[in-house]
Image (cartoon, rainbow, N blue to C red):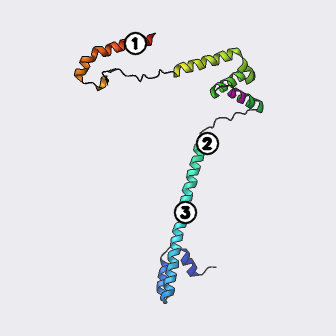
Amino acid sequence: MPNDEEILLNEDKDEAEKLVQEQVYDDSLRKSLLTEVARKKHWRERALKETESRKKLEEDNEKMKVELAKVNPPAVQNVSEDQLETILNLQSQGYSNAEILSLRKYSKTMGKTVAEIAEDSLIKAGLEAERTKTKVEQATPSPSSRTFQVQGKTWNEMNEGERKANFENMRSQFAVRGKSSSQ
């Protein structure tokens, strides 16, 4: 059974300091005991902070587990080695990932292998039509970087008087370029 002084030192009260002040008469011993009491308080405070932060982290961890449980990860698709080899062959033939996924979907629907579906002329025509449609949608004309110049100046560089004087020259250049580009 611990004695009374140990119990006092384990409690977080200022009684330990009072006891040291009252009962210890040697200054060097009093100083070292007060230092140890201060150290004990310091480490006890750090331990309490650590415990509180650990509890908070555990609570946050539990909250995150609940949030992760709410999110359903997509089902992992099992792919056999044969299917994997077929997919790699299709990629090497230039099929995109989206096209391969479409081929897999069609193969499941029609009950055929992906390789058989990829060789089907109707499927090939459909994929080619999709590729063409995508190219047309993504096609943008290249910007024209040519600027018209009259007497070595562009339209923006001219002042109002120069613009009025050179208007007919600029209009004739537009007309000439318009005819050559339409041919």
Q: Residue furthest toward the front? A: 151
Q: Which residue is mark 1?
A: 178
Q: Is residue 111 visible?
A: no
Separation (CA) of disc 3 from disc 1: 78 Å
Query: Dot 1 surroundings within 10 Å: few (below 14), some, or many (20 or more)?
Result: few
Residue 15: % across, % down? 49, 78
Say what amino acid the circle numbered 3 marks: Glu
Query: Dot 3 surroundings within 10 Å: few (below 14), some, or many (20 or more)?
Result: few
Sequence-wise first label, 1 or 2: 2
- In the image, which residues are magenta? 88-94
Element type where label 2 sits in the image: helix
Is residue 80 covered in magenta? no
- Foreground mark, 1 or 2, reads 1
Please report the residue visible at 38 percent of the width from the left and 12 percent of the height from the top: 176
Label disc, if present, on residue 50 of the rendered structure: 3
Residue 114: % across, % down? 73, 24
Element type where label 1 sits in the image: helix
Say what amino acid the circle numbered 1 marks: Gly
Q: Is residue 96 visible?
A: yes
Residue 21: % across, % down? 47, 84
